[in-house]
Image (tube, rainbow, N blue to C red):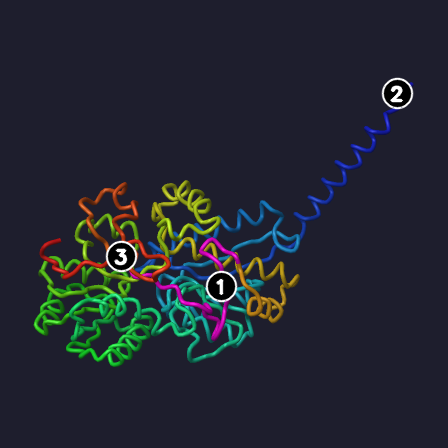
Amino acid sequence: MTRKRPAWLLTLAFIFGLVASTGAHAQDKQPITIGFGMGLTGGLAAAGKSALLAMQIWQDDVNAKGGLLGRPVKLIYYDDQSTPSTVPPLYTKLIDVDKVDFIVSGYGTNLVAPAMPIAMNHDRLFLGLFGLAVNSEFHYPKYFSMLPAGPDPKHAFCEPFFKVAMAADPKPKTLALLAEDSEFPKNASEGVRDIAKQDGINIVYDKTYPPGTPDFTPIVHAIQATNPDMVFVASYPPGSVGMLRAATESGLKTRFFGGGMVGLQYTSVKQQFGPKLNGVVNYDWWIPAPTMQFPGILDFLKQYQAKAAEAGVDPLGWYLPPFAYAYLQVLGEAIEGAKSTDQTKVADYIRSNSFKTVVGDITFGQDGEWSKPRVLEVQWQGIKSNNLDELKDTKFEAILDPSEYKTGTVTEPYNGSSQ
C-alpha cells in the first residue's frame, strides 16, 4: 500500500510545476534583439569598449528582472572599426540579415551620421549615442539623441566655454579655432563661429587638420603667432592627445584653452598627462561630483568598475558608460510603456514621455534632442601626479558651468610650459 500524499504537498508540487513551466515557456520565447555597431578597434575603441560593457550590464540587469514584455533581451553587435564607411553595410546587415527588432548607434557623431540614412530608409526607430546635431538636417521623427546638448546642439555644445571665458575681466577679444576635418568637429565649429560673432570676438586663426595628423607642433606655433586670448579645439581622441602634447611641449600661452577636445575625459588619457591637464577648460557630460549623483548612477558605476579590469576598459567609466546604459534604459522603458515592439508606437512613446535614467531625468524635444541642454564646462586644477587615486577625486576637476552643478571657479591664464 502507498501512503496518501497530504493535500498541501500536492498543492505545493502543482505550484512548483507551474512556475517551472512558466519559466521554461519564457526561455522558449524569442528574444527582443537590439543591433548596433561599436568602435571596438580604431581611434574610438577605448570609449567604444567601455560603452559595450555598460550595454551588457543593462542587458543582464533587464534579463534578471524577466526581460521586456516577458521576453529576454539580446544584444547583437559588430565592430565598426571607428570608421564611418563600415557603418552603412553593417546596419543594412543588422536589419536585413539579422532582422533585429531595434537598432541603436555606436559611439560618436562620425559613426551615428552614416547610419541615419539606413534607419530612415527602413523606417526604423534609431537612438544615437553622443552624436552632435546629426538630425539637424534630416529632421527624422524616429531619431532620439543620447547627448545632453539640447535642442540647439551646435551652439549649446560650445556656449559654456564662451560663457566661462566672457565672464572674465577683461573680456577676451580674440579666438583661434582648430578643428579636425570630420563630422563632429565641423558641426561644433559652426557653433563656435556663430557665438564668436555674437560676442564680438575676432577669429584670428581658423583651420582644420586631417584625421591622423602625427605632429601638432607646427599648428601650435602657428596659433601662438596670432597671440589669441582663447583657443578652441574641436577634436577626436587622437587629435586631442596630439594637440595637448604639443601645447605642453611647445609652451602654448593663451588665457583659455580647450573647449571641444574629445578624449581628455578618458581615464587612460588623464593618467597619461596628469598635471599637464591643469588649466585646460573643456566640455564634459558627467562626473561623480556631489552635485551630479543622480539616483542609480553610483550603483551602476559599482557594477561597471567591478567588471572593468577584466574587460580591459576605462577603470572609472565616468564619460560614456553611464549614457550607454541610459539610452538602453530609455529604449527598454519605451518598449514596456508602449507594450509593443512596433517602431512607430515605441517612437511615439519616447516623444511623449519623460524617462528616469542613471544620468538624470530626460525628455526629448526638437529633432529628438534633449529638451534641455546640460553641457558641463570643467577645468582640471591642482593635479600633482598621474596616480589613479588622485585623478578619481573630483576636487581636481572643477565644474564651472552650469551654475546648478558648479563646484569651482575658473583660473587663468593657460600656460602649457608651466604644466
Q: Amino acid at mark 1?
A: Val
Give the residue number, with chain letter if any, for mark 1: 104
Mark 3 closeness class: few <14, some 14–19, many ≥20 residues within 10 Å: many
Q: What residue sits 59% from the left and 70% below the top?
A: 348
Q: Which residues are magenta?
A: 356-378
> In the image, residue 228 lies at what x, y percent?
13, 72
Q: What residue sits 10% from the left and 68% below the top?
A: 218
Mark 2 closeness class: few <14, some 14–19, many ≥20 residues within 10 Å: few
Q: Which mark is residue 264?
A: 3
> In the image, residue 304 lies at what x, y percent?
42, 45
For marks 3 and 1, give the CA distance: 25 Å
Mark 1 closeness class: few <14, some 14–19, many ≥20 residues within 10 Å: many
Return the disc, 2 or 3, that comes first in the chain's sequence. Answer: 2
For marks 2 and 3, give the CA distance: 74 Å
Comparing labels 3 and 1, the label whose residue is closer to the camera: 3
> In the image, residue 51 lies at what x, y percent?
41, 54
